Image (cartoon, rainbow, N blue to C red):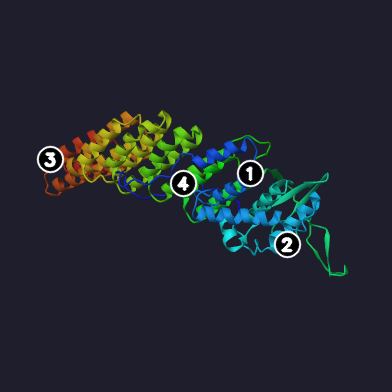
Amino acid sequence: MNKISFLFILFILGCPFFLGAQSSFPSLKKDPLAVEYAQRAKSGMSWEDLAEISLWASGVENPAAQGSGGRLAFLLKNAVSNLLAEQDLPPGERDRGEYIQEFMFKKQLLKRYSENQTRMDTLLDNGNYNCVSSAVLYAIFAKALGLDVRGVVTKDHVFIKLIAEGREIDIETTNRYGFEPGNRKEFHDGFGSATGFAYVPAHNYQSRTDINSLELISLIFNNRITELERASRFAEAVPLAISRAELLSNPTDTKYSNFFADPQKMVMDRIFNYGAYLIKQGKENDALLWADIASPLYPDPVRWKEFVNAGLNNLLLKLVRAKRFTDAWNALAANAPRLDAEDHKRLGAMLADADLSQKVSAIKTAKDADDVLGLLKNSPALLPAGRLREMTIYTLCKKAEFTAQSGGYKTAIAFIETALKEHGPDSRFDNLLKAFRANRVAELHNAFAEAYNKKNFENARALLEDALGEFPGNSQLLRDKEIADKAR
């Protein structure tokens, strides 16, 4: 028996924000036959019911109708009739249980073991079977003979348990000699002499769960779902899970586990697996529409919240990477009704950070810097304080560099000193201010040197006086003053 595999939600990018062709979503309606069969189960199931339901679970749309469904139902009913007509059918419950096992192989109903062949229609057509389909066939025969049987499910296997004459007998339906494993079976010739024996070892399963016949048939759905999801046909798996859940809608004593899934949990997992597949394929808008359609019918606030956030997160990341920030903001606004306030704020902060980071890194002119500073000033609620400060200081430093180029180092120094007062100490301000001051001193020294070399000593001394007014105590300018004083 195949285990149901779960597809975890993946954060992968794909298609653009604007709505294109919508996916054809799987139906979330209950199959009318599932409702009918669940109703029948309330009053007890005949072998005819089990036969019909097993074909429906295998994918036969209307097993009671004429055509292929009717043909397969006829084959199954004919097999039961042949069993009931067997001349040597023993009277005892245990012996009848063993007889069924021999009958299935002797009549070549079971021909070839195929690990993934769980469907009853395929079994009837070509004799291929696995543990599920062979166990279902056995259960139908047992019901027809009035025997009390249970399905038994383990981590990766299914078999039958017969309750007969005060005993519980395991039956490995995949093996011709699998009745009561662990017992040696002798073969005799026509004179009663032993001619050989067969032995099937008993399995000591650590965990096993008894299930009723309807639950046994439901495993056909499990295997079909697994095969579909392995082939990435997630949409087709959804209605199968819904049909399984409806079929098992009457409560039982069965304990659900990882190897016999709770019907409702299986539905929810299939619904989310399909949604995750849409996200993986880059169809985030379809995934969000799927959440709108499915969540009211199948609520799970925590999982839907995670799913919507994953889909929208992927959509925004894709648009950000394409530098389509206007589309990204529009996408966030359009999806706001799907988000709670906290998630809207978080995604808004992510988008604002990416948008502003791109604008900061693209600064080429003083006007660009002014535009970004205006945006940063108006975005305090969107960004964390530390991130806002980081971008602001970087932009101020860029503005200071443009100011130095256009207005000179004196103006740039004044700009940085003002920024220090408004935003507080920062090593980038300090380093830039140090460089600007050094360059300004160099400018003043060069102006003095030019006047001095032209022997315009009065102008040279005037320049130095102004320079020391800007930088009192500067060693370079003080040395220049000494030189100027000697030239009196």
Distance, label 4 to label 1, CA atoms, is 24 Å
Q: Residue shown at 51%/46% (left/top)? A: 240
Q: In the image, what residue type sits under mark 2?
A: Arg
Tell us which disc is closer to us: 4 or 3.
Answer: 4
On-image quarter of the N terminus? bottom right
Q: Nearer the viewer, residue 87 or 262?
A: 87
Which residue is under mark 2?
A: 176
- Viewer-side label of 3, 2: 2
Which is nearer the eye, 121 or 305?
121
What type is the residue that disc 4 sits on?
Tyr
Residue at (71%, 56%) from the top-left corner? 85
Inspect this view and state whether residue 475 appears.
Answer: no
Q: Which residue is mark 3?
A: 459
Q: Which residue is at a point 65% across and 51% down the rendered structure image?
A: 136
**Which mark is drawn over residue 215?**
1
Q: Secondary structure at mark 3?
A: helix
Residue 274's disc number = 4
Q: Position of residue 473 (x, y in %)?
A: 29, 36
